[in-house]
């Protein structure tokens, strides 16, 4: 399986997950989750740290519901993986479930913490930049390197002839210690190693990515690579962005793709 085939599958399954988490039935599950925590807020508060009130329940919902997007799903047999790890006849699906609190940890809004067992990208680095050292001299900071453990045995990020795809589903809430309100759910993709090498190789930064049409209104988006395939329009690009929906229960705001 080459990099272009992997890119196509990576995009296809990102859309499957996006459609799944934006579906009304899943949003109703989130509403029930919020309602249950609100009802027993003091009990939950006394049992979990602030930033963990949603984590376990959110991951549980995804374990129950995500298999529905796969054909003949099975549990991935290795412990080296993200929170939810499944596979079907096409891919291995890794999904990391993140539940963030905008009151207690707002700094996570622009950052995603990923461990070395949760991705196949060979490095996750900041832009390299010039740093003034303690001695006053300037040097180039190359960024932090990450070496995923799965690549030690499967260097192409392919297990059993299936590419391993890594996605992050983030659930945002606002928890002020008295009550909790869900605010947003979003999905982003962490590049597969071959996808990274094909489309990110001119950039030090290997970040989350998505797929969309690049129009003049998107001039400020960071373009990481061109998706060169005859079956796609010439303005189809790979960019850094998130598919997200604001959880306004009276009127869910569904993004246009």
Image: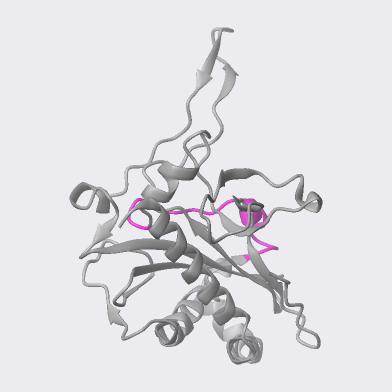
Residue at 33% across, 62% down = 164
Position of 120 relative to 67 (above/below): above
Position of 89 relative to 215 (above/below): below
Percent from the top left, x then y, of residue 9?
Answer: 43, 65
Residue 77 visible to the viewer? yes
Percent from the top left, x then y, of residue 195?
Answer: 43, 50
Position of 11 relative to 140 (above/below): below
| 112 sits left or right of 79 in the view | right
Percent from the top left, x then y, of residue 91?
Answer: 33, 69
| 240 sits left or right of 115 in the view | right
Residue toward you, 173 or 214: 214
113 within the magenta span = yes
Residue toward you, 117 or 105: 117
| 131 sits left or right of 10 in the view | right
Residue at 58% across, 79% down = 19
Residue toward you, 235 or 104: 235
Residue toward you, 101 or 241: 241
Residue 174 visible to the viewer? no
Q: Magenta part of the protein: which range?
A: 101-118
Q: Quadrant of the C terminus?
A: bottom right
Q: Main secondary structure of the magenta part?
A: loop
Q: Quadrant of the N terminus?
A: bottom left
Image mark count: 0
Percent from the top left, x then y, of residue 202?
Answer: 51, 33
185 within the magenta span = no
Position of 64 relative to 136 (above/below): below
């Amino acid at each position: 399986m080459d990099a272009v085939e992997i890119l196509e599958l990576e995009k296809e399954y990102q859309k499957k997950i996006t459609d799944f988490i934006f579906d009304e039935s899943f949003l109703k599950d989130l509403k029930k989750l919020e309602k249950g925590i609100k009802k027993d807020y003091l009990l939950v508060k006394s049992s979990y740290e602030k930033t963990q009130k949603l984590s376990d329940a959110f991951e549980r919902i995804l374990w129950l519901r995500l298999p529905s997007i796969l054909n003949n799903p099975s549990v991935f047999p290795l412990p080296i993986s993200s929170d939810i790890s499944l596979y079907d006849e096409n891919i291995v699906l890794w999904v990391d479930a993140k539940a963030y609190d905008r009151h207690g940890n707002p700094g996570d809004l622009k950052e995603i913490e990923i461990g070395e067992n949760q991705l196949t990208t060979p490095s996750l680095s900041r832009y390299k930049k010039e740093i003034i050292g303690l001695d006053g001299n300037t040097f180039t900071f190359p960024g932090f390197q990450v070496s995923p453990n799965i690549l030690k045995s499967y260097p192409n990020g392919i297990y059993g002839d299936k590419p391993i795809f890594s996605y992050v589903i983030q659930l945002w809430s606002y928890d002020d210690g008295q009550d909790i309100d869900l605010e947003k759910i979003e999905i982003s993709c962490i590049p597969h190693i071959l996808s990274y090498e094909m489309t990110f190789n001119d950039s030090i930064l290997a970040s989350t990515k998505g797929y969309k049409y690049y129009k003049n209104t998107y001039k400020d988006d960071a373009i990481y690579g061109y998706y060169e395939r005859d079956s796609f329009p010439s303005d189809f690009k790979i960019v850094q962005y998130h598919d997200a929906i604001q959880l306004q229960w009276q009127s869910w705001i569904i993004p246009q793709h």
